[in-house]
Image: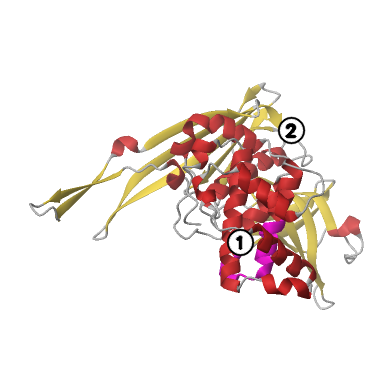
Amino acid sequence: MKEKKEFAGFWFLSENPQKIVPGTVKFDPDTSLNLELIGNFFEEKISFFDHGKNYSELIHGVDSEGKKISLVKCRVFNHVKTYKSKFSLTKYKIGYLLEGIHLSSENDKTFFQANFHTDKLNGWFARTNIKNSYTFNSDNEISGFNLSYDKSKDGFSFQSIFQGDFSLEILSNSWQHEKDFDGIDIKEIYTVKIKQNSQISFVDFIESIEKLILFFEFAFTSRVKIQSLYLFPYKSHLKKETDKSIGLYYLQSRNLRPKSPYERPIFNFNLISESFDKILNNWMSIDKRLEPILNYLIKSFQNDHNFDPSNFMTIINTLEGFHRRFRESKKIELKSRLNSIIDEFKTIDIITRLDLDTFKISKNRHYYSHFYEEDYEYLYEIGDLFGITVNLRILLICCILRHIGFDDNLLNNVNLDTL
């Protein structure tokens, strides 16, 4: 879903196919997925207070090339009608667009496979087909170098199974792209394939895809974009799978920074390869108790350039919430919770190097929660508070890594120094 795209055609409500209205869907992967109709599906003017007319669960369409299109979760956000014109203009915000099929409902159990593409996984798999070598003179100084392209590494395939019913396959493909007078570019793309043993809805596939993307975003602490996404339906009347692809378009919801400072992942495939199946299964089984903690953690990276005490409050409250949900549900003071977490990681080198005064940290949280004057004397300067927040975030990351299956050996080899 990397490029902008438009779908011009004719549209109708799934429950009322006789009323056909011309219009265009405009998709911008960074900002919007909207339907603009020249007219509307109702004779009378739409009332924004009439839920039955300003919201449609499913709109069908046929584009200019004759392709069937399903628009799911559609809500009117603008309706203009002038007395001088004979038509109105109606705009809908669209939740999802499926190109190549007319769904009967969003819960249709139609699909058995989803494929998506991204170009950011090369850094996670730590692969490259570019080789460099150096020559040295008698003074051990570099006297020359050589770059080469290893075509044998153009293809790469990795397979795994998670949650019993899903199989995961990740493939890469790279190729030379020659430019006149400008040298040679090496292009690389990763295809991620998720296959289900039985038919499920596109909504169920999105849930698994988003959770897998979040796994890579957690590793990179930055955004991982889907470049394209296709679903494959199961032809029940033929009792076989089909290679017909259905394009799926929607807006990825998380607003993360595009890159981390050094663009090096916290952990990569080489580090966890022997434990990957276990870690992936634990991650894909994350429930609603951990989801808000993960979301607050990952979004916290977006705010580093505009730091204020609210960033500190987000991390310290999230860390406290993790301990309450997964370590001790009884009501205990923040200082005790922090000491308990730090003690849990006393064999992890990076944690032992952190400078965390749990008493003073607790006083800072108390001050920014209630603004009691007696806590003012314990406040950190804003620069110091930023450093404390980064250290607490490292502690929180270690909590999550251990929760999904990282043992002490793996934790001692993760890259947390360059967040």
Residue 94 horizontal/vertical position (percent): 73, 55
Residue that label 1 marks: 389
Badge 2 amino acid: Lys
Q: Residue at x 68, y 55 (%)?
A: 296
Q: Is residue 382 left or right of residue 362?
A: left
Q: Is residue 418 left or right of residue 377?
A: left
Crowd tier of the residue under label 2, counting other residues whose Cα lies within 10 Å: few below 14, some 14–19, many 20 or above: some
Q: Is residue 155 magenta?
A: no
Residue 414 horizontal/vertical position (percent): 49, 45
Compared to residue 238, the image places residue 109 above or below, namely below
Residues drawn in magenta? 303-317
Q: Earlier in the sequence, mark 2 or mark 1?
A: 2
Residue 129 horizontal/vertical position (percent): 32, 42
| Of 184 and 291, the residue lying toward us | 291
The quadrant where residue 41 appears? bottom right
Residue that label 2 marks: 109
Task: Point out the frontmost of discs 2 and 1.
Answer: 1
Q: Residue at x 67, y 27 (%)?
A: 235
Mark 2 secondary-structure assignment:
loop
Residue 75 horizontal/vertical position (percent): 79, 58
Q: Residue at x 59, y 38 (%)?
A: 245
The quadrant where residue 364 appears? bottom right
> Alpha carbon of mark 2 to alpha carbon of mark 1: how far?
45 Å
| Of 361 and 325, the residue lying toward us | 361
